[in-house]
Image: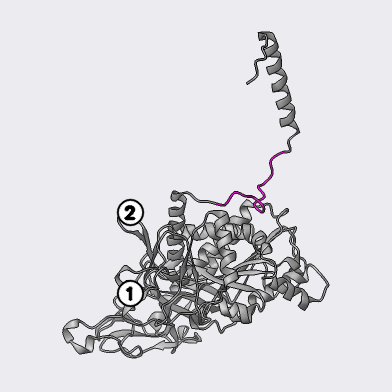
Amino acid sequence: MSNQQFTAAEAILMLKNTLENMAIDQAEKPEPVKAEFFGSKKPFNLTNEELLQKGQDYIDFTYESPTIYHVVDNLSKDLENNGFVYISEKEYDQWKNLKKGAKYYTKRGDSSLLAFTLGSKWEPKSGCGAIGSHIDALHVKLKPSSIKNTFEGYELLGVAPYSGTLNELWLNRDLGLGGRVIIKDSKTKKFSSVLIDSTPDCIAFIPSLAVHYGAPADFPYDKENQTIPVLGYFNDESKDVDEPTSEEKKSALFGKHSINLLRYIAKLANVKVSDLYQLDLELYDIQKGTFAGLKKDFLISPRQDDRLCSYPALQSLITYSNIVNLEKDNNLNVVALYDKEEVGSLDRQGAKSGIFDNTITRILSSYSPEDPELLLRTCLSNSFFISADVIHLHNPNFDHVYLENHKPKPNQGVTISLDSNGHMATDMVGVAIIEEIARINGDKTQYFQIKNNSRSGGTIGPSIACTGASGVRVIDLGIAEMSMHAIREVTGSKDVGLGIRFFVNFFKTYREVVENFGDL
């Protein structure tokens, strides 16, 4: 401590000079600019209230998006509302003239979607950070010809299972009808599509047999003959149904579906029956999701597998694009959302279709005239791809089926999925990279692996690593859920928000972490 003494006048003069110097320093500082997230040491975070709000946003999104077509449509609106520009895969000039510092998205078949942000400082040889997930969910699909003979007055509907449905979990549920309808304009002969959704109306149900009948009521039921949805009842004296008109008979679908159903669909689509040309419709649970538990620890909703990971993935890209200065960003960040994962990914909208590396190739074409194949392979080899899919949350009623120390818990963060038999794409370097990203940002990770006497499900991970984008490092992780493949599934009430937080921090941090691993 100094013993130097000052008079009052000297002290006032010193204070005046100090304040003037501070003013000068402040005037010389540049105007604040939009935050540069890349390189920032501060992780992206959400408060408890914000985490729960993200869960509520997801509940609302799921209710408004009963089919995969509604998912793509609503996510496309989210992207466009946040400055993303749509480019059709059928375009040429737009792909050749991509703007640096911009954000784009494309679709395929209206059931798969890929979005990306293109930092102005990005170099193609440095690769990209990507999150891939699937947006198809288990449902019951209308058959190409769903008409069935009225049986004892009951109007029935011909349907087929999409993956593991039409089991006891689908019995006695309020089922809605929705999807995509192809319309042919009778005057212009042009084709268009319309999305329909009967929510909140229940238009069908699949009745179980009362247990009083004994053995015939036991599961499993025959999926062709005993799980047929009921649409209505008409007795011999019913005046509710008019005969089809000559105009209605002009529809390409007349005779393939009941006239009652065609009229209902036409009403939802706001067209005439004669304009209906083709359908891709499904039945689904119309009950809205909800929080559950004494302290609202859980979130229960339909179709979590795998919109539970795909929704946070896309929201994280939107969030990242809004908090970074893309003019100074050196990342190419991608989110790819696929169809047909539940049935093998074998479709032009599936993970094996090449939409990811096709899009990367298109991006590269606007950058360099170099050997495109070599540039693509170099880019992919320097990329890191998260295959985000739901994982089994610990079920306390069946603790014995879980491997010790591999029991994911709710509201604890994302779970890394591992499998020694190759059902997942995760390797030890990928795990180390993810754990380093989580450590830097204060995010938690968990492990899941099956017991040796259990069988594992699959993900898009191996498809991306071996087919869709050969050479890219892929790791499987995701949000844990209970009752997977049930008509309603359970996750933690904060897990959607925790997923968004982790994915944003992944986009922020992956480059500096991956570069520290060199050629491992």
Judged from the image, the secondary structure of the residue bearing numbered disc 2 is loop
Q: Residue furthest left?
A: 212
The front one of 444 and 50 is: 444
Question: x, y (%) of residue 25?
Answer: 73, 30
Q: Is residue 118 above or below residue 6?
A: below
Q: Is residue 71 above or below residue 231?
A: above
Type of the residue with mark 2: Lys
Q: Which mark is residue 400?
A: 1
Q: Earlier in the sequence, mark 2 or mark 1?
A: 2
**Residue drawn at 33 percent across, 54 percent down:** 295
Quarter of the picture holding the N terminus: top right
Majority SS type along the magenta span: loop
Q: Residue furthest right?
A: 369
Label 2 to label 1, Cα distance in Å?
27 Å
Q: Is residue 205 visible?
A: no
Q: Is residue 435 visible?
A: yes
- Residue ID for mark 2: 295
Type of the residue with mark 1: His
Question: x, y (%) of residue 202?
Answer: 34, 72
